[in-house]
Amino acid sequence: MGSERLSKWMNVLLSQPSDSGPQVCVGFSAICRHVKNTSDEALIAAHKAKMLESLTKSLISVKIRPNSNFIRACSDLLHILQKTDVQETLLPALHKAMLRSPETITQTVGVVLENLDVYVDGVAIDIGKSLIVSLHSRDAWVRAQAPAAL
């Protein structure tokens, strides 16, 4: 894919509202995979904050349970995140979602953390505490998902 075509695709995705849905995040992830193979890192670095915002609003801060396959499809986007991105943006969003509605986000937390390339053991303790509480949930689905997320 040529640089001009790649820029056009990126601009189309960037023009979408951050909460447009998981398909935009999957598109960003496909671009991240392509860029990783072609070494055009500047394009991704310039728009990483917007891509992370889209991921957060479309797959984490949601009212209905997101499909975990969308999160797995975003693995290339999750792989580009640095520890500061995870600490300052992603983990607070996950923690807030866990406090607001653990029945919606429990599986998502585990899948997101599984697809990160960042060592987050020290900063993920609060999320782990929230997941432990989910082990005793009245919702059978949440109880079943909590061990896998942990």
Image (cartoon, rainbow, N blue to C red):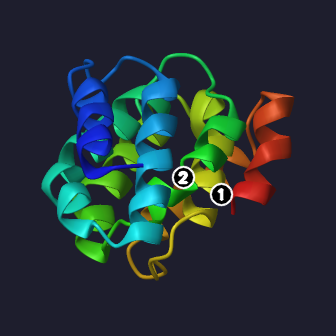
**Gap between marks 1 and 2 measured at Cα:** 5 Å
Residue 81 spot, x, y in % from top left? 35, 66
State left or right for residue 16 relative to residue 21.
left
Residue at horizontal 56 percent and vertical 62 percent from the top: 113
Q: Residue at x 49, y 59 (%)?
A: 33
Q: Which quarter of the rendering shows the C terminus?
A: bottom right
Dot 2 surroundings within 10 Å: few (below 14), some, or many (20 or more)?
some
Picture coordinates of residue 90, whole percent (x, y): 35, 53
Callout 1 secondary element: helix
**Residue type, label 2:** Ser
Which residue is tagged 1?
132
Please determine whether, in this image, residue 22 is positioned above or below residue 44.
above
Residue found 65% across the figure and 49% down from its top: 72
Q: Nearer the viewer, residue 5 or 74?
A: 5
Q: Is residue 115 left or right of residue 19?
A: right
In this view, the residue in front, 66 or 18, is 18
Side of 97 relative to 140 (left or right): left
Q: Position of residue 62 (x, y in %)?
A: 46, 23
Q: Which residue is mark 2?
A: 130
Check if mark 1's residue and mark 2's residue have beta carbons within 8 Å: yes
Q: Amino acid at mark 1?
A: Ile
Q: Please, is residue 23 above or below residue 90 in the view?
A: above
Residue beneath the point at 50% across and 47% down: 30
User: Mark 1, residues whose alpha carbon is within 10 Å: few (<14), some, or many (≥20)?
Assistant: some
Residue 94 lies, in percent from the top left, at 43, 47
Q: Nearer the viewer, residue 39 or 115?
A: 39
Q: Which mark is residue 86?
A: none
For label 2, the SS is helix
Q: Nearer the viewer, residue 92 or 138?
A: 92
